[in-house]
Amino acid sequence: MNDELINSVESLKVMLVSRATGGDGDDKDYKRLRRELSASPRIEKLLPQCVRVCRDLSEFWIFIKPKFDTYAKRKEYLRVEFDPLLTMLETGSRTPSDKAISATVQAVNSSFIQEAWHKALERRSTDPEGAITAARTLLESVCKHILDVADATYDDSADLPKLYNLTAKQLTLSPSQHTEQLFKQILGGCQTVVEGLGSLRNRHSDAHGKGVSGTKPLPRHAELAVNLSGTMATFLLQTWESRKKT
């Protein structure tokens, strides 16, 4: 997903450099790339000013021509303007677990799970409240997916802790299903993490209104919620696949 975004941003940059140094460009391609990139909150926030204000290449030429009197200055301006966005896409938006979690999610035949994970990643650094909501939705969708495939019954309005408890029992991951103290401790910790994610979403996500004393989560809080949710989702899905084989 990030590789595709990087290619789009690089294409847009090359197009603007060409136009700024006397070349031509395809207005349709520029408008398409501008529209697609602006649709992403984390991308739109870091788009160069010239892209945000110029709707087509003619407006860009009017913007850039009087601003700098040499091609070299124009190219340097665009390099500096695009650098924060490209740096974020290449390094800043990834954590070591993102690739592994994404691979597991993509292997599941569920658009709900895939959409929730992509939203969580997309909003992690720019919309912490939305990312926390997506993190909880991811786990809820994973639990319901496993329960559905296993032909297990559940209340569709059940909250995340209840859904997780049913899923854990289905997968023999409930602490009460084990006698070894180490396993009980680890699985109890997983249950606590899920309950905490549910509470975090209720308190700090965008799913509920807030009063005067309401607090806003920071990107690091969203990072924690998304990473924990992704890790738990991967554990549940991989355990389910293992159970099916045996």
Image (cartoon, rainbow, N blue to C red):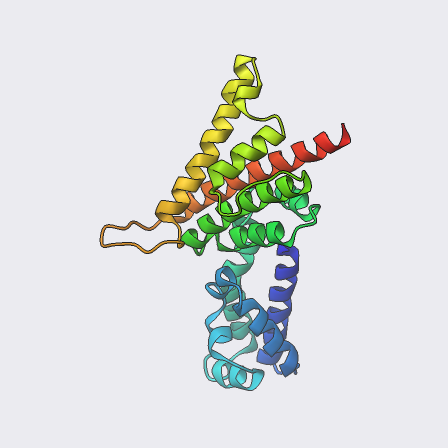
Instruction: Return the residue nearer the eye: 32 or 204.
Output: 204
| In this view, 220 is above or below 175 | below
Residue 211 occupies quadrant: bottom left
Question: In the rendered view, would you say 53 is above or below 146?
Answer: below
Q: Give the total number of marks visible in the rendering.
A: 0
Q: Residue at x 33, y 56 (%)?
A: 209
Give the farthest residue toward the left.
212
x, y (%) of residue 230? 56, 41
Left or right: 147 as drawn, with respect to 181:
right
Residue at horizontal 40 percent and vertical 54 percent from the top? 207
Q: Quadrant of the C terminus?
A: top right
Residue 220 quadrant: top left
Camera-nearest residue between 129 and 167 = 167
- Give above or below for 111 relative to 170: below
The residue most toward the top is: 180
x and y, in percent, of residue 195 in the image:
44, 35
Q: Is residue 159 left or right of residue 244?
A: left
Task: Examine the rendering and report whether any part of residue 25 can be seen.
Answer: no
Measured from the top left, where is residue 229 in percent x and y? Answer: 52, 41
Vertical side of 183 occupied by 242: above or below: below
**Nearer to us in this view, 127 or 185:** 185
| In the image: residue 90, left or right of residue 224 | right
Name, please, the residue furthest toward the right: 245
Residue 149 quadrant = top right
In this orientation, which residue lies closer to the viewer: 236 or 145?
Answer: 145
Q: Residue at x 71, y 35 (%)?
A: 241
Q: Quadrant of the N terminus?
A: bottom right
Residue 137 appears in view: yes
Q: Position of residue 5 (x, y in %)?
A: 62, 61
